[in-house]
Amino acid sequence: MKIVILAGGRGTRGKPFTDYFPKAMIPIEGKPLIDYIVKYLSSFDFIKEIIILSNYNGLGNQIQRYFEDKKTIQGKKIRFIQDSNSGTGGDLSHVTEVLKKEQDFILWFVDNFCAINLGKMYKFYKQKKSIACIATRKYRKEETGYAKVKDGIILEFQEKPTITMLMAECLGIYILSTKILKIIKSKKERKKDVNLSFDVLQELSKRKTVSAFDIGTTLWMDIESPNKVERNKATVREIIRKMKN
């Protein structure tokens, strides 16, 4: 099975840092974010190749230079493919050729930092017989303190609690049938930018062919900037520890 890492986003939430390096190269404990992700994904026996999709004519060339003397990681081949800045779905049209012999593939948005059990997620995807499976969560650890209030009086403080959300939050980790690529191709014939969620998966969800894999209380972080890493050092270190287990 092959995995595609989407690493070509503009990183607007990470400015001004991402004016100088892509999100994939955000430093964490002395190494770039993508180093942790690639090594973690390489630890799964069923993953045979890692494809990094980015803008190598721009800041993305920093990613390629970082891995330039590493043709493989832990025995897994690394391939670099140029994107076209045509949306989260549109950019996937560039991996059609390398995935032509595959039934399914994993898609990982580079700013997702999580030691998710991909083997368990893949098994769930197969059980549901879905065309797409999205990692989701119902629990979120807040970055700010909360207060219980009654009649304008604070009764209790809770420092950075874990809350249960009313709706499931979609994370940037997917397992997709390669049939998705044909749908994207047809969409691109009508519009330049194709958004994976709203232009493709939204329609498929109405046919009940998109499943949701709940990660439970597994730690997850959106690494949008070095500031986010700095504010959440304990969580980051715990995720790194889980990735190495």
Image (cartoon, rainbow, N blue to C red):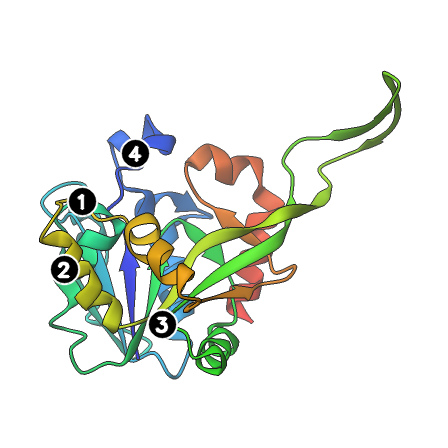
Q: Residue 82: where, in percent of width, then height?
A: 12, 54
Q: Alpha carbon of mark 3 to alpha carbon of mark 1: how far?
A: 22 Å
Residue 69 visible, this angle: no
Kindly identify the amino acid type of the residue bearing the numbered disc 3.
Answer: Ile
| Label disc, if present, on residue 131 of the rendered structure | 3
Q: Secondary structure at mark 2?
A: helix
Residue 46 as seen in the image, left or right of residue 146: left
Kindly identify the amino acid type of the residue bearing the numbered disc 4.
Answer: Thr
For the residues labelled 2 and 3, say whether their Cβ atoms are less than 8 Å apart.
no
Does label 4 or label 2 sit earlier along the sequence?
4
Q: Alpha carbon of mark 4 to alpha carbon of mark 2: how far?
A: 32 Å
| Label disc, if present, on residue 83 of the rendered structure | none
Q: Alpha carbon of mark 2 to alpha carbon of mark 3: how far?
A: 17 Å
Q: Which residue is mark 2?
A: 186
Splitting the image into 4 quarters, where does residue 106 fall? bottom left
Q: Secondary structure at mark 3?
A: loop
